[in-house]
Amino acid sequence: MTEPTMTLKGIDIFQGHMDRDKQIALLDDLREVIRAAPLFSPVTSGGKPMSVRMTSAGRLGWVSDRAGYRYQDHHPQGTAWPAIPASVLDLWHDLVDPVRAPDCCLINFYGEGARMGLHQDKDERDFSWPVLSLSLGDDGLFRVGGTRKGEPTASVWLKSGDVLRMGGAARMAFHGVDRIRFGSSRLLPKAGRINLTLRVVD
Ligand SMILES: O=C(O)CCC(=O)C(=O)O
Ligand SMILES: [Mn+2]
């Protein structure tokens, strides 16, 4: 059993869990996913553009547009989402469950100035499974609070190769990314940060 290198408000963090070769292999697989399911720029239900670009792999993908937030079985272009790469599933099976696979791998791309406000991951029907989050590329300042809005928060810089597991009470913790250090990593040729979240949806 792999032990976390630290915990932050109940979230298990595995710092440096993916070595450079694993990160490069993952990136190669993600390029194929993004070729089949291009990154798109979501808007909130109020029509406000989100600063991250995103896409998904798996049976279900997460989308947000004027009709609201939801999981659906196809990319906004109409095509089915590509399969979650085995290189990604391996990490899930290692750190979450050897048998059950996640339904969704949400892929967020943070360019210069992109961030993600404090939120809960609560569009899934089943909250009993952890969310596993993989960080690639530039450093991101991750903030986590409690399960209610306004509770004290704590922050950690997530680096390329770090893996985070939000399970138990921390499954419903508010969290977000305040900012990235654009250009801090040389993994992506044009800089930026990629975050993958693996989720059981239903
Ligand atoms: O980018 C991150 O580290 C977090 C992403 C996230 O919270 C989400 O996609 O729901
Ligand atoms: Mn989230």
Image (tube, rainbow, N blue to C red):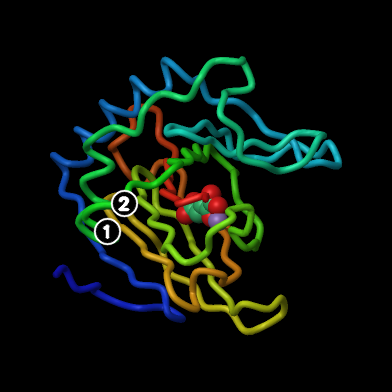
x and y, in percent, of residue 114 in the image: 59, 44
User: Where 126 sits versus 196, above or below?
Assistant: below
Pointer 2 residue = 100
x and y, in percent, of residue 111 in the image: 53, 36
Q: Which residue is painted at 52% across and 50% down in the image?
A: 202
Q: Is residue 31 left or right of residue 2?
A: right
View extreme (bottom): residue: 152
Position of the N terminus by quadrant: bottom left
Q: Which residue is painted at 65% across and 63% down in the image?
A: 118
Distance from the alpha carbon under mark 1 to that under mark 2: 6 Å
On the image, which quarter does residue 168 sit in? bottom left
User: Where 32 sits versus 120, above or below?
Assistant: above
Q: Which residue is painted at 83% across and 36% down in the image?
A: 47
On the image, which quarter does residue 98 sit in? bottom left
Pointer 1 residue = 97
Q: Which amino acid, mark 1? A: Asp
Residue 116 seen from this side: yes
Q: SS at mark 1?
A: loop
Residue 180 seen from this side: no
Mark 1 crowd level (few <14, some 14–19, many ≥20, 10 Å Cα): some
Q: Which residue is painted at 33% across and 27% down in the image?
A: 189
Q: SS at mark 2?
A: loop
Q: Are marks 1 and 2 in contact (CB under 8 Å)?
A: yes
